[in-house]
């Protein structure tokens, strides 16, 4: 069965500092990988995704993530954090899409990011 | 704004009662997914519908049921409510047979069972 582990429940960084959020997955083949962000009181917003090809993917809001097959990881990074980045971040994994109209994601438990001004 | 709408935003009800949560997917999306988010369980997939048919089932209790209507909106019915059902319930939608597997989430319905 597929699973996602986000080892850090809560991370605090200073504004302007760099950020890396960890995500490890367990899956039989190369999955599709996603990062979502949830601001307080909001739904989840897709930040970026990896399907194939270049292992470094760029997303919205200045975020990027790197897929490392050997480490089964898909860590999220940002070079300089802004106070508005304070939110909860979720990594998700899904199977390669088959076009059958059915697609199920498995989410990690999330990492809450606090930003110190 | 993801284009997915959910009503109501908040719902407070008593144990033993039944409630209905509603979701309208993004225009053109055929798939609707329901998730439950609680502090102890995290984000749990409940059920998926595609163009009116149930396609996948996750950790959905027998007291819960869902359906997707011809206009593609979906309803999640929760009955015999227990305190432990208090959670955020999200709906997400994704594209149809053309292959979009990115899920777009609605703002959620916060259910409080007292």
Image (spheres, rainbow, N blue to C red):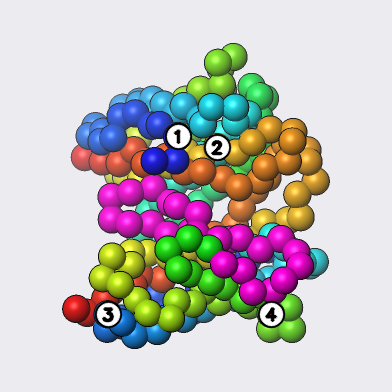
Residue B93: mark in rendering:
2
Instruction: Decide: is A5 above or below B6.
Output: below
Specify the segment rendered in magenta.
Answer: A34-58
Q: x%, y% of residue A38?
A: 38, 57
- Residue under numbered circle 1: B4
Q: Mark 1 falls on what kind of element?
A: loop
* Chain letter of the residue carrying label 2: B
- 3D distance between C-alphas at marks 3 and 4: 27 Å
Q: Are marks 2 and 4 on the same chain?
A: no
Where does residue A33 sit, x and y in percent of width and height? 64, 63
Q: Position of residue A43 (x, y in %)?
A: 39, 47
Which numbered disc flags the more N-terminal residue, 3 or 4?
3
| Badge 1 density bin: few <14, some 14–19, many ≥20, Cα 10 Å | many
Q: Using the image as rendered, state which of residue A82 and residue B26 is in the foreground.
A: A82
Magenta span: helix, strand or loop, mainly? Answer: strand
Callout 4: 10 Å neighbours few (<14), some, many (20+)?
few
Q: Nearer the viewer, mark 1 or mark 3?
A: 3
In the rendering, at what x and y percent does residue A66 appear?
Answer: 62, 76
**Residue at image mark 3:** A15
Query: Can you identify the residue that label 4 sits on?
Result: A68
Label 3 sits on a secondary structure element that is loop
How far is mark 2 from mark 3, CA to CA? 34 Å
Q: CA distance from mark 2 to mark 1?
A: 7 Å
Does residue A30 appear left or right of residue B15 in this picture?
A: right
Residue B78 in sight in this render: no
Image quadrant where residue A62 sits: bottom left
| A100 sits left or right of A113 in the view | right
SS at mark 4 in the image: strand
Badges 1 and 3, same chain: no
């Amino acid at each position: 069965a597929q699973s996602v582990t986000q080892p850090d429940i809560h991370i605090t960084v200073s504004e302007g500092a760099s950020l890396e959020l960890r995500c490890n997955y367990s899956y039989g083949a190369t999955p599709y990988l996603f990062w979502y962000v949830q601001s307080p009181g909001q739904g989840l917003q897709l930040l970026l995704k990896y399907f194939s090809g270049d292992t470094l993917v760029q997303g919205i809001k200045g975020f990027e993530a790197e897929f490392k097959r050997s480490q089964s990881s898909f860590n999220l990074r940002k070079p300089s954090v802004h106070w508005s980045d304070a939110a909860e971040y979720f990594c998700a994994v899904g199977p390669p899409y088959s076009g059958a109209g059915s697609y199920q994601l498995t989410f990690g438990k999330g990492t809450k990011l606090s930003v110190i001004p | 704004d993801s284009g997915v709408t959910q009503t109501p935003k908040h719902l407070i009800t008593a144990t033993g009662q039944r409630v209905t949560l509603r979701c309208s997917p993004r225009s053109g999306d055929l798939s609707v997914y329901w998730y439950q988010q609680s502090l102890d369980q995290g984000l749990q997939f409940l059920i998926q519908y595609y163009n009116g048919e149930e396609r996948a089932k996750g950790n959905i209790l027998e007291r819960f049921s869902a359906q997707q209507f011809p206009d593609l909106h979906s309803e999640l019915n929760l009955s015999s409510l227990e305190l432990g059902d208090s959670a955020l319930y999200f709906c997400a939608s994704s594209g149809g047979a053309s292959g979009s597997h990115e899920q777009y989430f609605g703002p959620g319905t916060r259910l409080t069972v007292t």
